[in-house]
Amino acid sequence: MKGHRLIGWMMMVAVPLLIATMAQGDTHLVQLREQVHVPGPTVVLRELAEIIGPHAEELGDIEIGNAALPGQNRTFQRSLVQSILAREGYTESQVDIKGPRLLRVTTIYQEVNAETVEKSLREFIETNMPWDPTDATIDLMVPSMTTVVPDGDVAIVWRSYPQYRYIGQGAFRGEIHVNGETQKTLVCRANIEAFGPVVVSARDIPRGTVITENDIHIEQRALSSLARGTAEDPADVIGAVARRTIFPDQVITSRHVQARTLVNRHQTVVVEARAGAMIARSQARALSDGGVGDEVRLRNPDSGEEFSGQVREDGVVVVR
């Protein structure tokens, strides 16, 4: 029993002395580890071993080989390490390699799952689409498979196809970056429906009727179903004339209405012209019909000269 204690005590004293002696000379101790986790994509000696000696930093930078793919393993032999060090100019008398004969090296990894991809794409769409997210529905179709990538800072960079207007079905291209480097490319699909205010008829509006505030109301409708020229503001239709009969609950477009005629052909109208602060008014005969904002042709009843002006809301034709 006393003999075992003596041997143990001698080892405790001898090992530190050996390490100290090696650190002071040109000899290095390389103590290999049996199982190692590395970030990749290459494996250097300091990741495989504890190195003691005057050139430990230099030895630690020596590349031993390529790491396995993220999440996978690769085995390195101690003899390989020794041969690489010899190739770098370190003889066996300079480097004492200790430890297991085989080293199992696992590449650190992380997973990017479908939930992460969907959350990232949804945030991108909500930030870039022209609709308020509260007024839209977004249905996403993303790959169900989990992507394994190296350890590091993960970011997904998205791009939409140029022709897509964030309404209906569209495709998005995503690149999974780790520490700024592209690791994987994804293609995901989205179906976006946005809803917005439109002018809808509240009752039958017969052809030729001047539309009033009581004839219409505002509703939220799916934008993908709307025709071009759909009225979004009541001011776009109030005071206009129905070109055709408009039925209840029908979305009103520019094809359903026309500006109310304020000036009729052959009608004598008031003409107004401005010169600085001065306003001159006269009368002229209209040669065409016109509503608010329309340009109409006029004839001076005295001289017969023809000119044009713009119809104002009160029916006066303004000459500029």
Image (cartoon, helix red, strand yellow):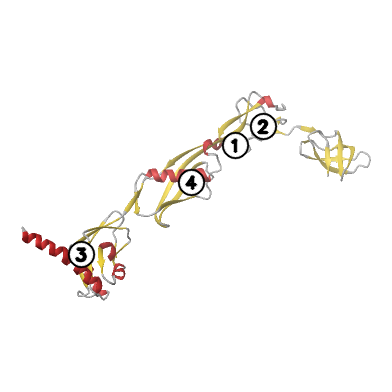
User: Looking at the figure, which quarter contains the C terminus?
Assistant: top right
Q: Are marks 3 and 4 in contact (CB under 8 Å)?
A: no
| 2 or 1: mark nearer the eye | 2
Residue located farthest toward the right when viewing the structure as drawn:
302
Mark 2 and mark 3 lie on one chain; the one further toward the N terminus is 3
Residue behind mark 4: 124
Numbered badge on residue 234: 2
Gap between marks 1 and 4 measured at Cα: 28 Å
Q: Which residue is mark 1?
A: 227
Residue 311, compared with residue 157, is above or below; it is above
Dot 2 and dot 3 residues touching (CB under 8 Å): no
Drawn side of residue 217 relative to residue 293, left or right: left
Q: Quadrant of residue 72?
A: bottom left
Quadrant where the N terminus is found in the figure: bottom left
- Alpha carbon distance from label 2 to label 3: 81 Å
Say which amino acid is labelled 4. Answer: Phe
Tell me the residue that label 3 is attached to. 77
Q: Nearer the viewer, mark 2 or mark 3?
A: 3
Residue at the spot 20% in from the left edge and 75% down from the top edge: 93
Q: Amino acid at mark 2?
A: Pro
- What's the CA distance linking mark 4 and mark 2? 33 Å
* Place of residue 35 in the rendered image (x, y in percent of width and height, measured from the top left): 23, 57
Q: Earlier in the sequence, mark 4 or mark 2?
A: 4
Gap in angstroms between the C-alphas marked 2 and 1: 17 Å
Q: Disc 1 residue type?
A: Ala
